[in-house]
Image (cartoon, rainbow, N blue to C red):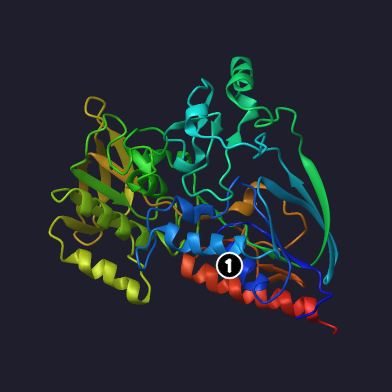
């Protein structure tokens, strides 16, 4: 270890950023971890389970939180973004903006306080399928385990109410954003991904029909902390679906939307089929696909489901989804490319398997770096001393992201020690 080395700046506190942070810190290097959300863990925390072991995210996250808490070399900033990076490898300067939480942490807050408020906001963690109060804990496993106040939607009445129901110094309505200027030796970009917006998929009913949902929404429906406390039900009537369709490559491998394959959607849908079969033994499920793409030992998910008499796989791209106005059921138009038959099938619910989009397309990176046509950072090292990892540079699963992050941490350390 170089005792005089500057810190490593990690942009993004999802599984990739956390892995890089603890790997570097545990061999003696200072790390500054910056996350735009109010909590660490990223998209993985919104999963019910992740493959191939079908573990809940809490099992790995609890270990990582313990590693972060116990390591004084890791500094964490949430509700934060890196606005500017300048300088050169080994000697970068960065500006970090930290948005106000409006919660001081001086006194504990619980749901009994939040429930007394009238102001509500869409629950982003559950993909806006329900609302939370303006004062909210992002999710049950949130780290740091602190409430957040959405000041913008808080009514004047609720402002006064909080003054009366909270101990003094619990809420600071005048809290301001602040900017830190830091010096670092290397940078890891782990900005992650988001699901493709289904409202772009007009022909598939995205954003139009209540019982057409995305794959990530289904992941939250089955989760105990989701909007239905773990029950997979139709949005239109809260009834259990008896006949469900999965539409693979919804917007993917399509020049009008995402021209690439996201690599994980097939496995995600196979996992979701298992969720449904575990909850509803008699449910009928049809998967419409172009190709089923699984990797290595994960193929077992597919072969096991081929033996399930309640699960059908039809090779064919869904061209159109319509809704029966009286029942809210969905009618799918699809050509079975094996039989050549055009199908018009009726389903209670449809799940669109949408692809992964890099988060970086939503904001300007703090330093000019090359990206491909889809917004992914190009190459293992986007520039000398700056390293992109995980879904910031291409679609990948948790296992591949963490391996990528360990490699980037080693390269960042090498950069700090260069010239000794």
> Secondary structure beneath disc 1?
helix
Q: Which of 201/300 is in front? A: 300
Q: Quadrant of the C terminus?
A: bottom right
Q: Is residue 310 above or below residue 103?
A: below
How many numbered circles are shown? 1
On the image, the x and y values in percent for residue 229 come to: 33, 40
- Quadrant of residue 248 in the image? bottom left
Residue 380 can be seen in this image: no
Whole-percent x and y of residue 314? 23, 58
Q: Residue at x 21, y 53 (%)?
A: 277
Q: Nearer the viewer, residue 112 or 233?
A: 112
Q: Residue at x 64, y 27 (%)?
A: 152
Q: Residue furthest top?
A: 157
Residue 384 appears in view: yes
Q: Is residue 418 left or right of residue 200?
A: right
| Percent x, y of residue 381 | 69, 72
Q: Quadrant of residue 198?
A: top left
- Which residue is more in the foreground, 418 or 211? 418
| Left or right position of 58 against 218 | right
* Residue 376: percent from left, percent from top: 61, 61
- The residue tagged 1 is 19
Q: Is residue 392 left or right of residue 383?
A: left
Quarter placement of the N terminus: bottom right
Q: Residues within 10 Å of mark 1 (few under 14, many from 20)?
A: many
Q: Above or below — where is 185 with respect to 310?
A: below
> Foreground residue, 288 or 349?
349
Please name the residue shown 29% across and 30% down the image.
Answer: 236
Rendered position, 188 above or below 101: below
């Amino acid at each position: 270890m170089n005792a005089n080395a500057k810190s490593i700046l990690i942009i993004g506190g999802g599984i990739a950023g956390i892995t890089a942070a603890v790997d570097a810190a545990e061999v003696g290097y200072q790390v500054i971890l910056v996350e735009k959300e109010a909590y660490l863990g990223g998209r993985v925390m919104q999963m019910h389970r992740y493959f191939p072991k079908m573990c809940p995210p809490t099992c790995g996250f609890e270990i990582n939180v313990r590693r972060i808490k116990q390591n004084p070399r890791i500094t964490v900033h949430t509700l934060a973004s890196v606005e500017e990076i300048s300088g050169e490898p080994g000697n970068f300067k960065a500006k970090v903006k930290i948005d106000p939480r409006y919660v001081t942490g001086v006194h504990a807050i619980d749901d009994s306080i939040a429930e007394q408020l009238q102001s509500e906001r869409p629950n982003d963690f559950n993909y806006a399928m329900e609302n939370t109060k303006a004062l909210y804990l992002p999710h049950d496993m949130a780290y740091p385990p602190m409430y957040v106040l959405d000041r913008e939607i808080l009514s004047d009445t609720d402002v006064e109410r909080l003054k009366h129901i909270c101990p003094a110094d619990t809420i600071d309505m005048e809290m301001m954003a602040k900017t830190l200027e830091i010096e670092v030796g290397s940078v890891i970009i782990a900005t992650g991904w988001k699901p493709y917006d289904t409202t772009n998929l007009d022909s598939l009913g995205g954003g139009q029909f209540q019982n057409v949902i995305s794959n990530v929404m289904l992941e939250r429906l089955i989760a105990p902390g989701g909007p239905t406390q773990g029950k997979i039900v139709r949005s239109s009537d809260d009834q259990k679906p008896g006949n469900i369709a999965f539409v693979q490559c919804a917007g993917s491998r399509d020049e009008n939307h995402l021209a690439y394959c996201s690599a994980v959607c097939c496995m995600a849908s196979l996992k979701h089929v298992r969720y449904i079969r575990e909850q509803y033994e008699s449910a009928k499920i049809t998967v419409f696909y172009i190709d089923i793409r699984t990797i290595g030992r994960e193929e077992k998910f597919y072969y096991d489901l081929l033996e399930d008499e309640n699960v059908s796989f039809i090779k064919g791209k869904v061209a159109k989804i319509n809704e029966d106005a009286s029942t809210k059921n969905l009618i799918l138009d699809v050509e079975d490319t094996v039989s050549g038959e055009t199908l018009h099938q009726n389903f209670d619910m449809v799940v669109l398997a949408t692809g992964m989009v890099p988060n970086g397309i939503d904001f300007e990176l703090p330093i000019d770096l090359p990206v491909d046509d889809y917004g992914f950072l190009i190459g293992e090292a986007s520039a000398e001393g700056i390293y992109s990892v995980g879904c910031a540079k291409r679609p990948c699963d948790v296992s591949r992201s963490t391996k990528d992050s360990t490699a980037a941490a080693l390269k960042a350390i090498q950069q700090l020690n260069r010239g000794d």
